[in-house]
Image: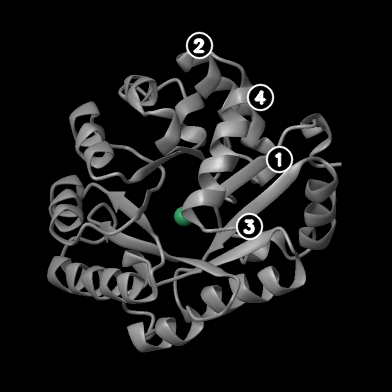
Amino acid sequence: MYTEDLKNSYPIFDTHSHYDDERFDEIRTELFAEMKQNGVCGIVSCGCDEVSSKMAIKMAEENDFVYAAVGIHPGSIDSGTTVEQIARLATHKKCVAIGEIGLDYYWVDDNKQKQIEIFEKQIALAKKLNLPIIVHDRDAHGDTLEILKKHKPKGIVHCYSGSVEMAQEIIKLGLYIGIGGVVTFKNAKKLPDVVRIIPDELLLVETDCPYLAPEPHRGKLCHSGMIKYTAQKIAEIRGTTPENIFTITAKNAKKIFNIE
Ligand code: NI
């Protein structure tokens, strides 16, 4: 069992994952079946290029509680995937967002203009289709915020890693903030202060699996069952219960992704 300790009666919605990852190939079917049994009511699997976006749609077609996001990740702008290809996939009935898209100056910073161009084109696509965006921002806080202010899309800033001041700006724009396993890490210095100020109605909980497994599983293969530890930590910081965190974040997820 992967998700045994999840068993509960409240809904769990993991708003950010990458179940196309080949590390799930052997266990994906079993994992999805268990999650459904153990309270997971929604998972969004994000695409990073055409191949992973198509895979997200395939998984969404096969599992009623799985939804797809399609997009070109800033780390995949040289993958050959075009915004036109993403636009075709985005009309699928189980595609609930354009993502994961954004800026990443940590891994590559010699193509900033290209990253910005692809990001803005995908924001335009999301607005045209009336879909939210799922934003990746790593070491690109200034440019990301400037673009969000300029275009005012609806959506989520995922795996939030910025300052309290930037979080306040994001909240003012009405964007949701996704909190992941990093909040459980001992070196998550600024994050607890951010978690404290997010209004209930803009808070989301996510895994980004297979990456970023929360403590006490840091370094292992992450899956949505581990979201329990992230919710526990968020609840502790906000002075509430994990059940309350799951309930409000599942409600928020359904609202932003327009589910039900
Ligand atoms: Ni991701």
For badge 3, the amino acid type reads Glu
Q: Residue 154 in the image: x percent, y percent?
A: 33, 56
- Considering depth in this image, is 203 or 187 the residue closer to the camera? 203
**Residue for point 29% across, 51% down:** 137
For badge 1, the amino acid type reads Gly
What is the quadrant of the C terminus in the image?
A: bottom right
Res 27 quadrant in image: bottom right
Question: Is 259 displayed left or right of 121 in the figure?
Answer: right
Residue 225: give its label: 1
**Residue for point 57% across, 41% down:** 251
Q: Residue 185 in the image: x percent, y percent?
A: 47, 25
Is residue 170 placed above or below 124 in the rendered structure? above
Circle 1 residues within 10 Å: few <14, some 14–19, many ≥20:
many
For badge 2, the amino acid type reads Gly
SS category of the residue bearing label 4 = helix
Mark 2, residue position: 239
Is residue 79 placed above or below 19 in the rendered structure? below
Mark 3, residue position: 260
Earlier in the chain: of badge 4 and badge 1, it is 1
SS category of the residue bearing label 2 = loop
**Residue for point 82% across, 40% down:** 38
Mark 4, residue position: 243
- Considering depth in this image, is 140 or 154 the residue closer to the camera? 154
Is residue 50 placed above or below 74 in the rendered structure? below
Calculate the distance from the C-alpha at mark 4 to the C-alpha at mark 1.
14 Å
Camera-near label (4 vs 3) is 3
Calculate the distance from the C-alpha at mark 2 to the C-alpha at mark 4.
12 Å
Calculate the distance from the C-alpha at mark 3 to the C-alpha at mark 1.
23 Å
Res 17 quadrant in image: bottom right
